[in-house]
Image: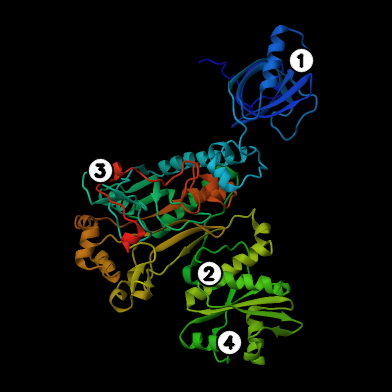
Amino acid sequence: MTFTKRTHNCGELRTSDIGKRVTLNGWVASRRDMGAMMFVDIRDRYGITQVVFDASEKTTQNADVFATGRKLRSEFVISASGVVRKREKGNSNLATGQIEILVSHCEILNEAETPPFEISEDTTASEEQCLKYRYLDLRRHSLQEKFIIRNKFYQITHQYFHEHNFLEIETPVLMKSTPEGARDFLVPSRIHKGKFYALPQSPQIYKQLLMVGGFDRYVQIVKCFRDEDLRADRQPEFSQIDVEMSFIDQDEILRLTEGYVKRLWKEILNIEVETPFRRIQFTEAMQRYGSDKPDTRFAMELCELTEEVKECEFNVFKVVAHNNGTIAALNAKGCARYSRKDTDALTELAKRYGAKGLSIVKYVDGKFESPIAKYLSTYMQSAILQKTGAENGDLLLIAADDWERCLTILGQLRLEIARREKILDVVKEKFDFLFVVDFPLLEFSPEENRFAARHHPFTSPKAEDIPLFEKNPAAMRANAYDLVINGMEIGGGSLRIYRRDIQEKMFKALGFTKEEAEQKFGFLLGAFRYGAPPHGGIAFGLDRFVMTLAGTENIRDVIAFPKTTSMYSLMDDSPSTVSEAQLQTLGIKLTTPDQQE
């Protein structure tokens, strides 16, 4: 099959091309039949150009061309040739809006059925429908522009790390399942029946082994897989920029990161980013913003009230305070106008983050309007006003729980108030870069009755905290850091444990026996016997990076073929069942839920 190939794309012709004979290939975006004239917009990923079919030229050839134009419908794939001429009434919304093409030859390369939804920027199709017909949705220019940004992001990444002497090295996709972090996706082995590979949650162990192997600067753009609940900024498979270096310290890693971000923002958005970025300790971030990834583009900081109300007669506050918990408040300025429906919604949000309840105080005409007001003395009310800076018309949201849960609840309420009050709309054009540092090394899991690694089990503790492995593991701090942009964690990393004795202490603190540690991580511990260098690194979420640069809050906008929040691919109907023969080959037998019980 042959066709007339394009001489130009649909986004490049200008008035300087008037008089040229050209050929465009693309999709019919729209067709307007005016009787003796037809106007057709042809679209490709570069833009849209208007072509004109004119019946006034009384030739056999033109009659055939006009008849072909009459057959065109939305999304037909066509080739159109003709002469570029000036458009009578220009369209300033199009880059090609001052010209058009008088068609002298037209081929229908492929017909199309009527699409299930209009392919336009103001489509009314649901997200589910767009995902089911993703190949059609991808024709929209707003989506294509995001993938152009993503492509540019790739090129800058390769170039930046090449300039800093990094080697790009691939690591295995089939690896050993490890017990820490999110759930693994498992891959059964046909040859070794009853045994499984895991898809990597990250190349963490392999990049550390590369450091042992003497590759002092490694980088990789890599696919990672995590079997965890999804949300707007999370997918089961995602792309990561993985960076690891030997013989470095934390400052060097953070400076490299700042240079990388500065380069991305300059070359993609033409924005100069000031460095160095602000650094904020984990404890301060939680106390002020209720988040380890705070959005500091707006104020609305939390304040602790434990001392002010610990002796009040409200039993919830009294019990929490006397059990070394935290009582803290968020002042939602001007929000005393909220209805009961509004405050009930805030309470439900708090409960989703573990709150047993939420104390709500409206400060109106010099009085506390709240069920808890009767438990607060005049002195306590005055202290609360002074601490929170509350004024007439303000709404105080007060949480009481253990330190981290209390502040996390208020941190989520802070973001919700910012959304409701359109504060996020005001700051949406602003970029705020910071590092959160000095995270706790461990966190206690009541469900498992043991400590878990806050980041991962290979994160190095602060040197001065190493003696606390035996005395007080909960107080240990990590050499860990996160890059946060506009309240989104874009990257995270740490200095790594590189001595076998320290790694063994870490496994012991996590509740592993020597046998379990050897079984699961013996190859890493073995490598440490042969001279592992001091090393550390950082991993960036490529998809989240592109989301931020492209100005979208939905990760599905920057992944060509994403899954839904239930980890389902509507387009190709996966995951799906497989045949009994396939299962037998793998040595797998499925059971029903009843059989499992």
Q: In what element is the residue under mark 4?
A: helix
Does residue 15 sit above or below 233 in this rendering?
Answer: above
Rendering colour mode: rainbow
Q: Are marks 2 and 3 in contact (CB under 8 Å)?
A: no
Residue hosting label 1: 55
Does residue 372 sit above or below 39 in this rendering?
Answer: below
For this rendering, which residue is in front, 585 or 268?
585
Residue 596 sits in quarter: bottom left
Q: Give me the C-alpha separation between circle 4 and circle 2.
A: 27 Å
Q: Residue at x 56, y 78 (%)?
A: 357
Identity of the residue furthest to the front in this view = 594
Circle nearer the viewer, 3 or 4: 3
Residue kind at label 2, given as amino acid type = Arg
Residue kind at label 3, given as amino acid type = Thr
Q: Residue at x 20, y 57 (%)?
A: 526
Residue hosting label 3: 585
Residue kind at label 1, given as amino acid type = Ala
- Within-10-Å neighbours for mark 1: few <14, some 14–19, many 20+: some
Residue hosting label 2: 352
Residue 261 seen by the camera: no
